[in-house]
Image: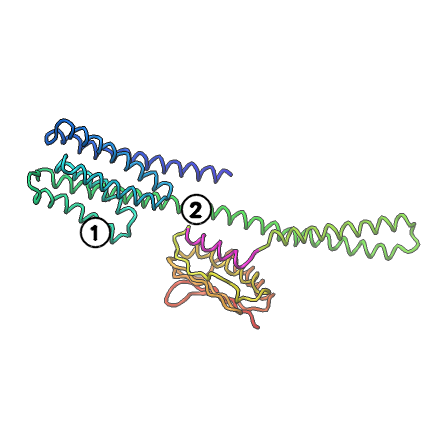
Amino acid sequence: MAGEGESAELRGLDERRRLLLSLGMLCYPFLAAAGVDQYTRGAGLVVCYLLLVAISACYLAIVVASMRSAWRVYWWLLAVLTVLAVLVAPLARENVLILAALVVPSAAARADDRTASALVVLGAAACVVVPMVVPGWSTDASWYYAVAVVFTALLVHAFSRTATANQQLREARAEVARLATEAERNRIARDLHDLLGHSLTAITMKSSLARKLAVGAPPAALAEMESVEQLSRHALADVRAAVSGYRDVTLAGELARGRELLRAAGVVADLPTACDGVPEERQELFAWVVREGLTNVVRHARASRCTVELTASSVEVRDDGVGGPAGAGSGLDGLRARVTAAGGALTAGPAQPRGWSLRVEVSA
């Protein structure tokens, strides 16, 4: 709960920073308004100011749509913003070019790197060229407008990357916390099975033996011994049921969890979308292999891509990370014991041309 509260607090901090940046960028409509009165008078001046107010409101709406991931609304609002800027042009003349510092970064923020770079270059070039070709427009501030476009685009890009990195960090921290909780559950399950389960089994056997040996004992004593035996059997059954619940894993669930885990860690996930080809009796074993393999990829590999390959008799987790031998405490020893008990073979080691591979094969 504390982790969730901290994550929500960090998300709120990112949103407040984004709003602060957006409010700062509203200086561009004000800069455009500052030079309007030298070209426009009377009703035209009022209309121009109203259009600039509408541009400011539209830009804030774009920011809100971005924060809510309402991308269809985002693009519609950006189109409206562009139209409003065009309508201002006859009234504000070259002053309207400062509004490119709103339009261009907003469009570039949702484009891929190559498209974004092209948009910024075209926007900056337009700020320089347009005043030269439109009669009556001054070229005095052309380079100022171009620099404003480039500077704002870089600022928005840097902030966007930082916000994305923060989000991925929060998701990774949440996943690490979840994995730690899961590991603790597995430890408790193992202790229940190894310690309490063993003790209850011994009590059950000794109670049964004592009841058989107590020939000629009072009937009440025999009834009490039988009661002890039944209680220990019920307790043992409860422990086994609890252990089974703690250790419940499915191959489909581990693939879905692994896809989210890799995404949060910034690793490209090449995972199967279905596991129907794996026989039912092998799915739990393969689920443990996928869990251990993907956990090690995230924790140790420093990889950019991870691939999981499934067949009816094998599963392989392979990455393109730093490779190297598995260290102590990696969890492979426990997994190897589980695989050996199922009649399979586990191989783990460097992959070619680079990275690490964890492969389990089970004979038919």
**Apparent side of residue 58 relative to residue 204 in the rendered image (left or right):** left
The x, y position of residue 238, in whole percent, is: 70, 50
Closer-to-camera residue (251/137)? 137
Say if 292 sits above or below 364 in the image.
above
The x, y position of residue 136, in whole percent, is: 6, 38
For disc 2, the marked residue is 171
Q: How is the image coloured?
A: rainbow
Say if 154 sits above or below 285 in the image.
above
Number of numbered discs on residues: 2
Q: Mark 2 or mark 1, which is nearer the start of the sequence? A: 1
Q: Is residue 256 magenta?
A: yes
- Residue sitting farthest toward the front: 43
Within the image, what quadrant is residue 6 found in? top left
Secondary structure at numbered mark 2: helix
**Apparent side of residue 11 relative to residue 193 in the rendered image (left or right):** left
Closer-to-camera residue (208/130)? 130
Numbered badge on residue 118: 1
Q: Is residue 192 magenta?
A: no
Q: What is the C-alpha distance between the residues marked 1 and 2?
A: 32 Å
- Residue sitting farthest toward the left: 135
Within the image, what quadrant is residue 283 found in? bottom right
Mark 1 residue crowding within 10 angstroms, few (<14) / some (14–19) / many (20+): few
- Magenta stretch? 249-263
